[in-house]
Image (tube, rainbow, N blue to C red):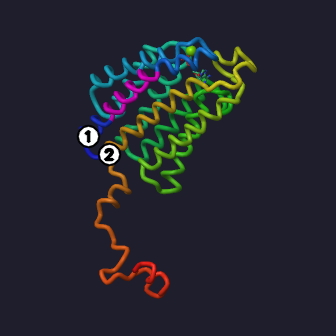
Amino acid sequence: MADSDTEREALLAAIANVADRLADEKEHLTDLDSAIGDADHGANMNRGFGAAVEEAESAEGEATDVVKAVGRALVSKVGGASGPLYGGSIMAASAELEGGITAETTVAFGEAYLEKMQDRGDAPIGAKTMVDAVTPAVHTYKKSIETDDLSPLEALGKAVDAAERGVDFTVPLRAKKGRASYLGWRSVGHQDPGATSTLFVLEELLATAEDYLDDETERDAAAPAEPDVDPDGTNPEAADDPAANEEAE
Ligand code: ADP
Ligand code: MG
């Protein structure tokens, strides 16, 4: 991303968008957590990200410091499973943003976030936790950037789609970690609250990135369009194909 002022502005906008979204979804997340947990996930996320906005705004320094302040706020304001898992993973992964926010550092951030979450929570994929949304999102983002050569914005779009499928995937699973695991087979048929809040966070990161990142596709759209049809009415790509020229006329 361009200069560090723009980077900071984008980051603060992203954190504020996430906080607003989680405030809007508070009841939704509470409902999901009341089915298989203790009905506090909506309040936890809302309180945590509300505090994160304030901490991020008053944080000095670069992107890495602002993101670390978000993690710290979540750890200190949110108890239960999700505070240390979200907050601790964000704090650990924030170190990867030392070089600013780039395609490379955001891939490293995602990988470090997932790794820390698994270290701490010990949930494999399929245990019906937020790991089921984070894992496909991180893997898809990395592949989209490193193998498919997509722009960060396109890659983030793919990551959101992957997280959404991850959330759907949690529904038929039996919970193996966290409070929901106490329900055993009765957890089957319910959507995991932590995976769902993860999707909301990613959706807001994407919406903010759309506002701040110049995408390749936007640049293409801004370039003068190549005419499909010659001024004399023939289709240049079909110069040797009289049928196509007839269609163009
Ligand atoms: P608590 O379960 O302590 O009430 P929350 O309700 O805020 O905390 O968060 C619940 C969410 O935490 C679950 O929906 C699940 O996604 C996530 N979670 C619980 N345990 C783990 C774990 N060991 N690893 C990863 N995520 C977990
Ligand atoms: Mg709960």
242 shown above or below 79: below
Which label's residue is closer to the chain start, 2 or 1? 2
Q: Position of residue 195 (x, y in %)?
A: 56, 29
Q: Which label sits on residue 224?
A: none
What's under tag 2, amino acid-wise?
Met
245 shown above or below 43: below
Q: Are marks 2 and 1 in contact (CB under 8 Å)?
A: yes
State the SS at label 2. loop
For label 1, the residue is 6
State the SS at label 1. helix
Q: Which residues are magenta?
A: 11-25
Mark 1 nearby-residue class (10 Å; few <14, some 14–19, many ≥20):
few
By secondary structure, the bulk of the magenta-drawn segment is best described as: helix
**Considering the image in quadrants, where does the N terminus appear?**
top left
Q: Position of residue 125 (x, y in %)?
A: 66, 33
Nearest the viewer among 200 and 100 is 200
Q: Which label sits on residue 1?
A: 2
